[in-house]
Image: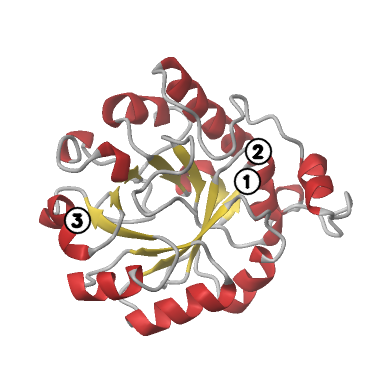
């Protein structure tokens, strides 16, 4: 995971695909150039079980940051799940207290505290003991965009991950406006809740990489400017078979 100062080695803009619910979508995101993938354990349309995520994490290359998203979960339970599964980070997306967040941050590899835009806690990140803050819209997972000015100047950009309504068409503007450490997307790259669209994922990664390049920002953990790494190359590098065994989600008809 990124070190505790909120920076990955050589990285300023980290691209994360969140709301992953299947191994196929996880490998798809990796193959198309994502630096990180997120799994939602909190109640939502994209919720997954720790057991299911364990199987996915076992197949993901070690250089990818795997993030578990929790909301108002007992801190000890968060630590247990993250460390048992082998996740690289915990994202706390509820009304966790500074003590709750500090407890988790001291016991897992990396921690993000999420706040809705405009929340006073964004400017008090040090009180929470977390190395990074994720700023989201008021309704997480809704696909709504918040006013980026609410995050401007409130937190060090080197510690900021931007979420909330990002998509291929606006991620470059978000990067240009805020110059964040990372960008996070779920709804904006889906064909339906929890089902990633490969064309949208690829477009999102390309747009983020190009925006960073145009601003002279070093690239992220996976330094492809065009997202051009094939699924077979990812499989070969990890020692997997080129045959995934089952079709990707996007190759199947909705049932």
Tell me if residue 42 comes above or below residue 126 in the rendering.
Answer: below
Q: Which residue is mark 2?
A: 32
Q: Comparing marks 1 and 3, which lies closer to the viewer?
A: 3
- Tell me the SS state at disc 2: loop
Q: Earlier in the sequence, mark 3 or mark 2?
A: 2
**Could you tell whether 3 is left or right of 135 in the image?**
right
Up/down of 115 relative to 74, above or below: above
Q: CB atoms at circles 1 and 2 under 8 Å apart?
A: yes
Q: Nearer the viewer, mark 3 or mark 2?
A: 3
Looking at the image, which residue sits at the far left? 120
Residue drawn at (24%, 63%) of the image: 129
Quickly name the residue at label 3: 125
Instruction: Find disc 1 in the rendering and name its residue.
Output: 29
**Quick one: label 2, few (<14), some, or many (20+) residues within 10 Å?**
many
Task: Describe residue 154's horizontal placement relative to residue 78 as left or right.
Answer: left
Q: Tag 1, which secondary structure? A: helix
User: Residue 46: image x %, image y %?
Assistant: 50, 63
- How far, Cα to Cα, is label 3 from label 2? 32 Å
Dot 3, how many residues are within 10 Å of its Cα: few (below 14), some (14-19), or many (20+)? Answer: many
């Amino acid at each position: 995971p990124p070190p505790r100062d909120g920076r990955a080695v050589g990285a300023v803009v980290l691209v994360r695909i969140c709301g992953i619910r299947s191994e196929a979508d996880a490998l798809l995101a990796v193959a198309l150039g994502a630096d990180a993938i997120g799994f939602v354990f909190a109640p939502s349309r994209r919720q997954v079980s720790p057991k299911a995520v364990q199987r996915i994490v076992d197949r993901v290359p070690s250089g990818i940051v795997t993030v578990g998203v929790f909301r108002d979960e007992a801190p000890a339970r968060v630590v247990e799940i993250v460390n048992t599964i082998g996740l690289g980070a915990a994202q706390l997306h509820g009304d966790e207290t500074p003590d709750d967040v500090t407890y988790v941050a001291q016991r897992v590899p990396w921690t993000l505290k999420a706040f809705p835009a405009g929340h006073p806690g964004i400017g008090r990140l040090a009180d929470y003991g977390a190395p990074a803050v994720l700023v989201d819209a008021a309704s997480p997972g809704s696909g709504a965009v918040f006013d980026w000015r609410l995050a401007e100047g409130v937190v060090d950009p080197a510690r900021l991950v931007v979420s909330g309504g990002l998509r291929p068409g606006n991620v470059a503007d978000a990067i240009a406006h805020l110059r964040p450490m990372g960008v996070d997307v779920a709804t904006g790259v889906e064909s339906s809740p929890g089902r990633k669209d490969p064309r949208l994922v690829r477009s999102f990664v390309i747009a983020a990489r190009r925006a960073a390049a145009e601003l002279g920002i070093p690239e992220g953990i996976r330094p492809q400017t065009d997202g051009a790494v094939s699924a077979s190359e990812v499989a070969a590098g990890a020692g997997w078979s080129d045959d995934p065994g089952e079709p990707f989600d996007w190759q199947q008809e909705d049932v």
